[in-house]
Image: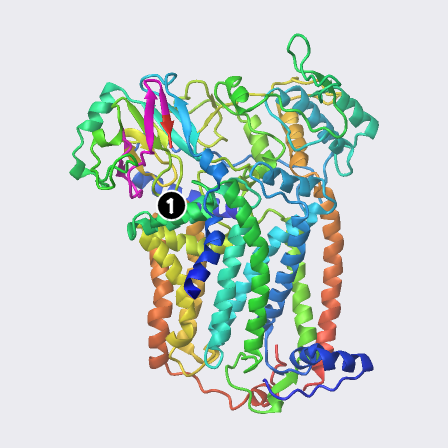
Amino acid sequence: MSGQSTYTPKTGLEKWIDQRLPLPRLMHDTMTTFPTPRNLNIWYTFGGILTFCLGVQIVTGIVLAMHYVANADMAFDSVESIMRDVNYGWLMRTIHSTGASMFFLAVYIHMFRGLYYGSYKAPRELIWIIGVLIYVLMMATAFFGYVLPWGQMSFWGATVITSLFSSIDQVIPHLGTAITTWLWGDFAVGDATLNRFFSLHYLLPFIIAGVVGLHLWALHVPGNNNPLGIDVKSPQDTVPFHPYYTVKDAFYLCCFVALFALFVFYAPDFFGNPDNYQKANPLVTPPDIVPEWYLLPFYAMLRSIPQKLIGVLVLVGSLVTLVFVPWLDTSRVRSCRFRPLMKQFFWAFAVDCVILGYCGSQSVDAAAFGVPLVWVARLGTLYYFGYFWVLMPIIGLIETPKKLPTSIAQSVLGEPAAAPAE
Amino acid sequence: MGAVGVVAVAWPFIDEMNPSAAVLALSSTEVDISPVAVGQQVVVKWRGHPLFVRHRTAKEIAEAKAVNVSDLPDPLARNSNLPDSAPATDANREFKPEWLILVGVCTHLGCTPTGFEGDYGGWLCHCHGSQYDTAGRIRKGPAPANLQVPPYSFLSDTRIKVG
Amino acid sequence: MMRTAFSLGLAMGLLATAPALTPALALDTTKLPVKKVDFSFDGPFGTYDQAALQRGFQVYKEVCSACHGLDHIAFHNLDEAGGLGFTEAQAKAIAAGYKIPADPNDKGEIFDDKGTRLTRPGTLADKFPNPFANEEAARANNDGNLPPDLSLIVKAREGGAHYVYSIVTGFHLNPPKGFTVTAGKYYNPYFEGWNIGMPPPLTDNAVTYSDGTKATVDQEAHDVATFLAWASDPKMEERKRVGFGALVFLIVLSGLLFFSYRKVWADLH
């Protein structure tokens, strides 16, 4: 909660710095004494994990940039040189490519946590919106990054997605083509495109870092939400961030890094696509063009619409929809723990996203159990939009929520057999 | 006054992303079409795209001419050498009936269609099943438009300049 | 791995739809699943069998290199740790056996009087030279087919080393009734579409192994697949070794942090 700082410098050095730049004060207030609800569970550790992921990507990325060559004739070979010749280059590259997947795994858990516990509800709407902005910036960064190795999937994925802008021609003739030519710097994806994607891929993570700062600043005004979704009412409801949550976050971060390490060292190509180990060839199209797994649900939504422009609008709409969530949900109760009806639709939504992802991974004419996947994707898209625009407004109004506990402390400490806050 | 200043400063930053002089110089290609026998197609590179140079047989020409434009999913000629509104008659798809010069990029999602495949004898795009006829017009499948005819001209009977 | 899982689902789906949607005459020319075969480098503790690597290198050198390049491998990779186990002297000798286009001489010439490109013996710094000068020459010498470079082939194909093994041992089968092999191609059901441009590359005793191992097609295939797996991933052994240490460290650290976490939170109740 933002309020008066209780910081008193302990050493002469701290006092000297604090008088000139209140950084020690900031660290103290936000990460040491900051009152945090005592009942935060594992799903609340992913914000810290995400900051770690951003740091890892930036550090490994800067190291890779010392060896990578952003030229269409040399990019692929420079990446192979990193993998084979640069000392520990294989490790840097694998951490960076696996790290992108871990980053999105963490962000999806983080976002679903927000949806489940109602963390987007007043007064935290802006934290949510800033979070959506971070997510979109992450998608752009990952998209640019995937093009850099200049493999077949890099090239053709870039071609397919940038070509989407040409659908604007259907509304304003020639404007779409002018925009795609301007984006490409050429009449097709090529060297000019690669170079600018590298520039933007290097830039965006620092913009993300800045927006993350805003995200945390906005968070520290009301303070954290919690699994019960009820406000902090007294100091009994909170504990200081340090040492309680520093140690808890450290433990879960270590588990996350262990999972990360499992992929890096024992399944480095698990998230990748074999086609990207072939050099980009503008004259040969791979049989199936697929993006990385974290973009698959959106790819499925795009492909499920036969009309190109409408498909693009659906894709954009699926992201813009997220901005309106704080106002679409009419429930007075934040947490799905006390919303028995919404809870079920939430899990159906989670399953829907996985199904959409599966549809996106398969070729367009694929079928499962006799059903063409394009129809599954259409139903999935319908449920995606229906969840936000129909269910969220309606369920909040018709649902009978469960009785809320009187306070966090009462919920955690009240019953003698209460389990420790997880 | 301020707006003029802002635009004047912003424009170079926007225009630098447009194709450079080096790219524009490569934007024009001359192709010797004499090695392409009747009933054959070659694929050359033009502006980074595949370019189909197809020497049509009399049968293919006749089939293309026999099609009613009103039966076509895309009724427009998509010919950079003609106005946008020109209809997709076979005559509007080339300068000489035996030479079909097309941009080999499927108008659906940008894949390269394979020649002499599909129900119409033109092209089949293996990515999502779009089928084009012997004038490169879309007949079946998800592609919204006919294959684009690039800007080109005949320098002689055996040489064309594209772009 | 994810793609394999999804492909299995797709195969199930296709099998379900095929009778309903495809005409009775059309054959489904989807490639067969890769053959089950054991490799020494499989699994989290797998390593490269050095003898197999050296035999596989011999197969590559004497059979495959006629058409296939190995662009990303340099001669100095041959004596690297976690690889073939050659000494530096052996690697130098192998390099010297290759002719590399020479730099201009003092007169600035790169051709001799007859117009042949001047060459010099290879050194450890050189990469394996490509059998063809460019893509067009490669196609002209192979009926229009382009033999892919092999330095990443195991990572560039789903099924990896198992796929490579299946392809080179998959030529002995006869095409089923109703399937006509395209002119100029060969029947191989482990290749998508069943028509492959490569003629069967291996025969029994195509090479004479210097370690005396019997050179059956199966042995040659197994060895060359092992060699190509190394070519795609020469750091594999180092990666698994570092990984083991990293994971042990992280598991121990997680344990310690867990106890710290419990201790810090214990006093709250």
| Residue A219: quadrant of the picture | bottom right
Residue C196 at x, y = what percent?
Answer: 48, 25
The residue sitting at 67% across, 19% down in the picture is C62
The residue sitting at 33% across, 80% down in the picture is A398
Look at the image and tell me in which quarter the N terminus of chain A lies. bottom right
Rendered image coloring scheme: rainbow
**Which is nearer the eye, A376 or A85?**
A85
Task: Classify C249 as above or below A281.
Answer: below
Question: Does the magenta stretch mainly form a helix, a strand or a loop?
Answer: loop
For label 1, the residue is: A364
Residue C124 at x, y = what percent?
Answer: 77, 29
The residue sitting at 27% across, 28% down in the picture is B94
Residue A36 visible in the current orientation: yes
Task: Classify A234 as above or below C214.
Answer: below
Name the residue type under label 1: Val
The residue segment tinted magenta is B133-160
Task: Classify C27 as above or below A125.
Answer: above
In this image, A263 relative to C45: left or right? left
The numbered mark 1 sits on a residue in which chain? A
Residue B143 magenta = yes
In this image, A98 relative to B8: left or right? right
Residue A224 at x, y = what percent?
Answer: 56, 79
In this image, A181 relative to C92: left or right? left
Task: Classify C57 as above or below A120.
Answer: above
Secondary structure of the residue carrying numbered label 1: loop
Look at the image and tell me in which quarter the C terminus of chain A lies. bottom right
In this image, C174 relative to B36: left or right? right
Identity of the residue furthest to the top in this view: C114
Instruction: Rate crowding at label 1 as few (under 14), some (14 to 19) or many (20 or more) other CA atoms within 10 Å.
Output: some
Residue A296 at x, y = what percent?
Answer: 46, 53
Residue A278 magenta = no
